[in-house]
Amino acid sequence: MAAFSTSSSRPYHIIIFGASGFTGQFVVEEVARTASEGPKGSLKWAVAGRNRAKLEKVVEQAAGALSKPELKSEVDILVADVSDLDSLAVMCKQAVIVLSCVGPYRFFGDPVVKSCVENGAHCIDISGEPQFLESMQLNYHDQAAGNGVYIVGSCGFDSIPADMGVIYTRDQFKGTLTAVESFLTASAGPEGGCIHDGTWQSAIYGLADSNKLRSLRKKFGHKPLPVVGPKIKRRGTLFYSNELQQYAIPFMGTDPSVVKRTQRYLTEELNESPVQYGAYVGVGGISNIFKLVFAGLMFFFFVKFSFGRNLLIKFPEFFSFGFFSKAGPTRKQMEGSSFRFIFLGEGYTEGSDPSEGKPNGKIRTLVKGPEVGYVATPIAMVQAALTMLNESDSLPNTGGVYTPGATFAKTTLIDRLNKHGIQFSVL
């Protein structure tokens, strides 16, 4: 197994690659904020990216935001570029874990994963792009396993709250949990809220390439997962949710695919009973539905053509009704924003036979936390890294390309998240 401790030749527990990007700057602050939680109470870390001056500015900004002027002298800066493979190799050889913050990952993520696998560095990313995540598993899982390297994707808001939320719900249920539905709502404060357009770009390219994702999945040759209990009923494209007291739609993000991959791992590798999953998101009232339909129709039409995709990328605010922005949210907007995931589970209570009759037990759980993109995501990513550093004995037996749930099911990640504002509870 690749090392989880530093050495003279591998001096950094963590290197944040893409640290000067919009999300990367907040990951830098979160690492600085939680460095005392590293192995034996300390953490040796560095930032990396293409532009030294921008990286210096990010470290200086973190020093000011956290009132830690010592960061300017303590945090090392490495220059590395995805287009310069030698520079990536030099970086990866110095890190125990690389935090990859270079989206859209379909364009910039592969060289980072490849270099980590080849040079013995574990890697965590915050991708919400199923095609990237699953292609990394297809292309690098065996080599990563052989080298004892752990590659763990989607360790931000996509998809730690959903993936670990399903595991938490299963662990809290007294019996055999067979199905879970999640209902997501996000709220903004008086300042409003938005998401940086990097996420918008990932969605554009992801939808444009949806056919490639289907053909990619065929290459795995997976058998269907066994269904325990009744098959979960899929809800409509638009429905009124009594759970949320508002209209809801199926969640279009990466959560369903990540949860399914986790359940496959838990079933095939650990012989655990699989949990079926359905994901939905609240969209509010009637006025929001009209906006959603209009924006959705334009999006689905324009994304099919190169010219249309260019328009979508050039004018994110217009096409998303201000939900996505080139500038990203302000710190005040982040402070006022939050999310809630309600999980509704059903199954068979202890002593009941899952092969007979209808489920006779229900459970409701909640995962809630701060603003999704630049507060919750850095918290989740950094706590995932700290869990790997501190609890390597609780990770899967071999290296490989894994989901968060597969990686952290047997660790204290949920307890760590609870202490940092992403809270899991039974309702």
Image: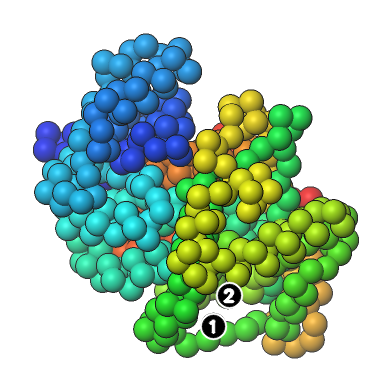
Spot occupied by residue 6 in the image (x, y as percentages of width and height): 21, 37
Can the viewer see residue 244? no
Q: Circle 2 is placed at which residue position? A: 274
- Which quadrant of the structure image shows residue 373? top right
What is the crowding at mark 2: few (fewer than 14 residues within 10 Å), some, or many (at least 20)?
A: many
Q: Residue at 61%, 46% (x, y): give it.
A: 317
What count of labels does the image hold? 2
- Relative depth, front residue between 125 and 354: 125
Identify whether 285 is placed above or below 280: above
Spot occupied by residue 391 in the image (x, y as percentages of width and height): 38, 46
Q: Residue at 47%, 17% (x, y): give it.
A: 66
Labels 1 and 2: the sequence-earlier one: 1
Spot occupied by residue 324 in the image (x, y as percentages of width and height): 59, 46
- Relative depth, front residue between 134 and 197: 197
Mark 1 or 2, closer to the camera: 1
- Give the amino acid type for the residue marked by disc 1 in the picture: Leu
Can the viewer see residue 69? yes
- Callout 1: SS: loop
Q: Residue furthest front?
A: 307
- Give the amino acid type for the residue marked by disc 2 in the picture: Pro
Distance in Å between CA atoms under marks 1 and 2:
7 Å
Q: Residue at 52%, 86% (x, y): give it.
A: 224
Identify whether 101 is placed above or below 232: above
Name the mark on residue 225.
Answer: 1
Q: Residue at 73%, 84% (x, y): give it.
A: 230
Left/right of residue 109 with respect to residue 301 in the rendered view: left
